[in-house]
Image (cartoon, rainbow, N blue to C red):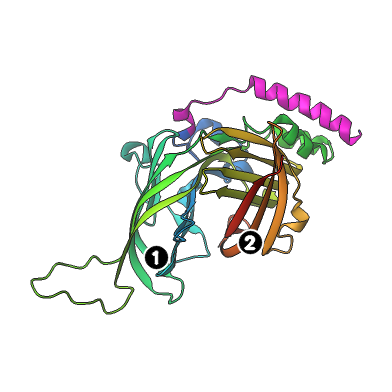
Amino acid sequence: MKLFSKFLAMWALVKLGKRKAKRPSPREFEAVHPVEGLPEIDALAPEFQKNMIDSYYCNSVNPVDGTHFVLRLARRPAGVCELWVCVDLPGFGTLEAPMHPNTHAFLCKEDPVQTGVVASTSGLSFHCVDPLRRWEIKFDGLLRLQHSRRLVPVRFELRWSAHADMFSTEHDVPPACTAAGMAHVPWDKAFWEKLRAPHQVHYEQFGRVQGWVEVGRTPRPTAGPAVPPRSPEAFFRRGVDCFGMRDHAYGMRRWSSFLRYVCIFVPFQSGHCVQLSLCDLEFPNVRRLASGYLIDPCGQLTPVASVSACLDTLGADGQPPAEYSLTFATTDNRTLFLRYKLDRTHFFDMRPQATVVCHESLGRFELVDIT
């Protein structure tokens, strides 16, 4: 079957599927989603059961002072979780989880339904205050200073508030984008079996992150004159006012299925936000899938229709490029130019779940409307 004919056929199937699909309510989206113990999960093949996930992620930055948070907690079966914690505090240093770049950890023994805390491990917790509007992220534990390898006590409390509506990969990606990705692969028996298999639900939102971060032990008040700390690591406190994106994914995710995946998300000081995704997936079988969205300063979200970038030129050697530029078009017929220059990168080793390395990079971006 010719490529264009396959595209038209898949476009019709995807469009029909989206019409039939019921969009969950905000509370249903944000609910705790079990990764084991339910009859519908127990009925799945063992390969699917062990790859169930309930993942919470937040990446935020202050472009003025450079404060940057990469936080992720993903629940897996048998009490296992994937933990990402990296905090950049310019003027002090970079803090990371003690086992970083390893991400394998175990959940605390608490009931998320009873406590109201969605997930918690190694001091990190995510708490939904108001579905799709407000979240709290807290940490109280030990992190490792990157430059000295010392473990130091760290506390932070962050309040995330929504800037725009959520974007669901299941409901909001234009059918033409999905159809184009599926038209590039053979439509054999295995292809259709993978389409019918369990998959993950994924959605994301941009928002503002405010709060505070504290490193070291709080100085105790004394009757005498103040004594200066013995080292700059003794105590450090900073207010946090960042902007960024959080996401939630649940269902079946197997990291080894991601043959290549590049996600660019940028909050600009103007209030614009950009998200672009490019991926090759083995499960389901998809190639050259490009999607994303543009958010205007007023919070209006517009899906992306096409992206000029190619995965072959975006980190195919295993390293993010130092500089890159691309164009993308939105569904309201705007064309925009995006250019970036790499600043720094954190990487996360996903073993033993899969022999995969995730790079989280920070850079300087420029956005120009060239419509």
* Horizontal and vertical percent position of residue 362: 56, 59
Instruction: Pick the residue in front: 166 or 195.
Output: 166
Residue 360 appearing in the image: no
- Which residue type does callout 2 highlight? Lys
Question: What mark, if any, has residue 106 been given in the picture?
Answer: none
Which residue is outermost to the bottom?
Answer: 230
Spatial CA distance of label 2 from label 1 is: 29 Å
Amino acid type shown at disc 1: Leu
For label 2, the residue is: 341
- The residue depicted at 62 percent of the width and 23 percent of the height is 21
Can you tell which mark lies on residue 143?
A: 1
Write the start and end of the magenta stretch as one range: 2-29
Is residue 21 magenta-colored?
yes
Residue 329, relative to residue 263: is it above or below?
above
Q: Which residue is drawn at 72% across and 30% down?
A: 175
Q: Residue 42: horizontal and vertical position, in percent? A: 55, 36
Residue 298 visible, this angle: yes
Q: Quadrant of the N terminus?
A: top right
